[in-house]
Image (spheres, rainbow, N blue to C red):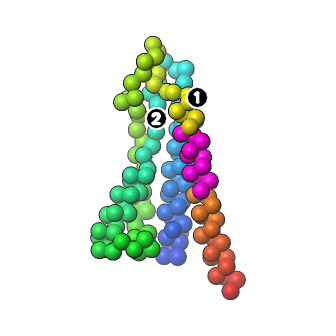
Amino acid sequence: MISSDAFSYINVLDRTMDASWLRQTMIANNLANVDTPNYKRQDIEFKSVLERQMKTTAMQLGDGSINRVVKNMDTAKLNGTQYTDYANFSYRIDRNNVDVDTENVELASEQLNYQALTTATNAEFSRFDIVTKS
């Protein structure tokens, strides 16, 4: 993490990319265990954590300006919540609840999300590059 107001967006993007990478790893692990008896799929929830932190910061500031919210957000609190999905009951005899098709769709979606985050991070660094060359 970089300690400067100029890097606020990059710090938030960094934490978001970490959560996205972890989610991809967890989905790949689910796919690897598709034939493991009694295995329950695992996932991470990050989006709601980010939204809650942004709303909390906006309320504390009394201002909904995205720039001020991101600048003042405590990125140390941006940690995804890992969980085991017991609610997704299995109709399989081995009690494994991993569905290959669902996991593949989730993995593709998360890969696109990670690509978008990478593009956004590169754009932020490009802005710094433009400013430093001026």
Q: Which stretch is magenta?
A: 106-116
Report how far apart the C-alphas of labels 2 and 1 lie in the structure.
12 Å
The image shows residue 133, relative to residue 95, as above or below, that is below
Q: Dot 1 surroundings within 10 Å: few (below 14), some, or many (20 or more)?
A: few
**Label 2 close to label 1 by CB (< 8 Å):** no
Figure quadrant of the C terminus? bottom right
The kind of secondary structure the magenta stretch mainly shows is helix
Residue 5 appears left or right of 73? right
Q: Earlier in the sequence, mark 2 or mark 1?
A: 1
Question: In the rendered image, which quarter is residue 120 located in?
Answer: bottom right
- From the image, tell me which residue sits under label 2: 42
Q: Label 1, on which residue?
A: 32
Please name the residue shown 66% across and 72% down the image.
126
- Left or right relative to 132: residue 50: left
Residue sitting at x 54%, y 60%? 14
Drawn side of residue 57 relative to residue 18, left or right? left
Q: In which image quadrant can residue 84 be found? A: top left
Q: At label 1, which amino acid type do we have?
A: Ala
Residue 107 placed where, x, y %? 57, 40
Identify the residue shown where x is 53% and y is 52%.
Answer: 18
Q: Residue furthest top?
A: 93
Identify which residue is drawn at 29% across, 74% down: 62
Residue at disc 1, secondary structure: helix
For label 2, count other residues whose C-alpha is less than 10 Å away and answer few (under 14), some (14-19) or many (20+).
some
Q: Position of residue 127 (x, y in %)?
A: 62, 75
**Is residue 58 in the magenta section?**
no
Image x and y of residue 46, in percent: 43, 50
Which amino acid, mark 2?
Gln
